[in-house]
Image (spheres, rainbow, N blue to C red):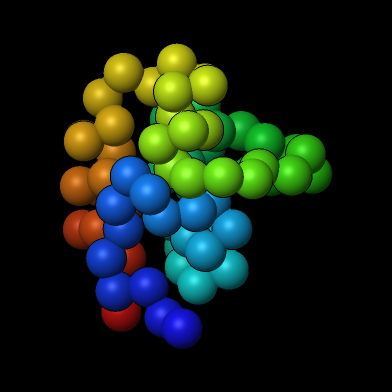
Amino acid sequence: MTINSIGPHTTIEEIVREHPELIKILMDYGLQCVSCGEPLWGSLEENAREKGVKNLEVLIKKLNQTMKV
């Protein structure tokens, strides 16, 4: 299944698997573990909250604007 739109409940695994071009943006927002080898499980919202991302809506908008469909 291809992700056409990212929301707070989209999982990190789905984003990385379907749209690897978005990894840099995740890293820019402090979700560094995408590249360090530590598995990130759960939703974008859960991980953003855990990492202290305060502007989740801005992150989601940026991911959707950058996503190659």
Total number of numbered labels? 0
From the viewer's perspective, tell me whether residue 17 is left or right of residue 4.
right
Quarter holding the C terminus is: bottom left
| Picture quadrant of residue 49 | top left
Instruction: Determine the residue positioned at 47% across, 33% down.
Output: 46
Residue 21 x/y as whole percent: 46, 63
Residue 28 in view here: no
Comparing 2 with 36, the one in front is 2
Residue 51 versus residue 1 in the image, above or below = above
Residue 3 in view here: yes
Residue 59 x/y as whole percent: 29, 38
Instruction: Determine the residue positioned at 48% across, 60% down.
Output: 15
From the viewer's perspective, tell me whether residue 27 is left or right of residue 5.
right
Comparing 15 with 35, the one in front is 15
Instruction: Determine the residue positioned at 67% across, 36% down.
Output: 33
From the viewer's perspective, tell me whether residue 53 is left or right of residue 16.
left
Residue sitting at the far bottom: 1
Residue 25 versus residue 6 in the image, above or below = above
Residue 60 x/y as whole percent: 27, 45
Residue 64 versus residue 46 in the image, above or below = below
Residue 31 x/y as whole percent: 54, 33
| Picture quadrant of residue 40 | top right
Residue 19 versus residue 52 in the image, above or below = below
